[in-house]
Amino acid sequence: MQLLSMIVFLMLSLLSSLIMLFVPTLFWVWAMTDFSTIFMIPFLSSEVRSKKSWFTGVATYFVVQFIGSVSILYGMLMQWIFAWDPLCSGLLCFGFSLKLGLVPLHFWVARSFINFHYGGIFVVGAGQKVFVVASVPLFHDVPVCAYIFYWMAIASMLYGPVAMFNAITIKSFLGYSSVGHTGFLVVSSHFGLHLVYVYALIYCVSMFFLNFILWSGDCFLVKDLGMDIPLYYKPGFIMSGLSFSGFPPFLDFCAKFVVLQTALEASAHLAIFAILASSLINLLVWVWIVAIGASSATDSLTPSGSIGQNVLNISCVTWNMFMGLGFSLLY
């Protein structure tokens, strides 16, 4: 019954987020964002297993999202009543940046993630953010605020991989990784929403596989990854890590290369520098994580789980290794 409740609230949250893609005004974007957040609370606070620390993460998430929503609503009201475009756009920029967890408003991300279950980390850190980022063109019409939002995304791209080096727990590591990828999504939105959807699809599917593998091993500390990840999932984890590291021809490399190519065509020199610098740091940190995760493997890395586990593992390997080649041919 508890699992069914989680699924129902998750579906309601995703449905509210999906509606944001089809609404033409900022008011309805704000309304659907709030509905999505409200439905997320029961999902985040429910687990099949009991957990004493869930309230810390959920409470932090709810307070931050509430403050962001108030800022967005106040900005819209000021615009309707007084037409103060710079101030209104600034409040909207602050509200959406806080909701997304862009630097320097990222303080809540790791604190919340460390107390979420892995399903909550996937939805909050990947799935839900896509719909919010897709709403960016509706509010950054004032150049000053657009540049501030852009700079915050650049800072997030650079800060995320650096902070990942200092992460002790896996969930905080995923939180900082989410900050970096959110920066990529926001920068992509400046070049076109089609690029956001392409990058988001690749990121979300890859994160689904990674979160499922980490959840299956009940992974907690980074240093214990090698022992916690089940042997039959190690090939999938290694392929996911190599993909997130940005090695060609893995899928994540192809996604970032498309963003880099678009930035080159637009002569966005700051974005080009941030993409290259972030990718280099990201490469180092993920090679480190893969090395830890691949350790303690005394047997050969062959499928040894159930049929369902082997199918998921092979699907993860196929998605990260071979879909990159297919994506390169199609895009």
Image (cartoon, helix red, strand yellow):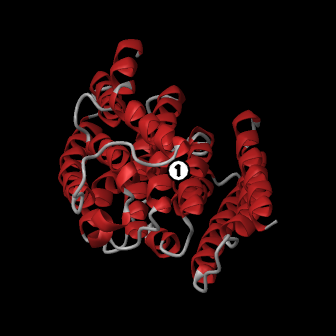
Position of the C terminus by quadrant:
top left
Image point 56% across, 70% down: which residue?
A: 116
In this rendering, position of residue 20 left or right of residue 159: right
Q: Is residue 97 above or below residue 311?
A: below
Q: Quadrant of residue 133?
A: top right
> At numbered mark 1, what does the secondary structure look like: helix, strand or loop?
helix
In this rendering, position of residue 316 left or right of residue 246: right
**Residue 59 on image: x %, y %:** 64, 79
Image point 63% across, 56% down: which residue?
A: 88
**Residue 209 on image: x %, y %:** 47, 46
Residue receiving disc 1: 126
Task: Say which amino acid is labelled 1.
Answer: Ala
Position of the N terminus by quadrant:
bottom right
Image point 42% across, 32% down: which residue?
A: 319
**Residue 113 on image: x %, y %:** 50, 69
Q: Nearer the viewer, residue 74 or 23?
A: 23
Q: Quadrant of residue 184?
A: top left
**Residue 241 on image: x %, y %:** 30, 48
Q: Give the tally of numbered discs.
A: 1
Image point 38% across, 50% down: which residue?
A: 232
Q: Is residue 134 above or below residue 286?
A: above
Q: Residues within 10 Å of mark 1 (few under 14, many from 20)?
A: many
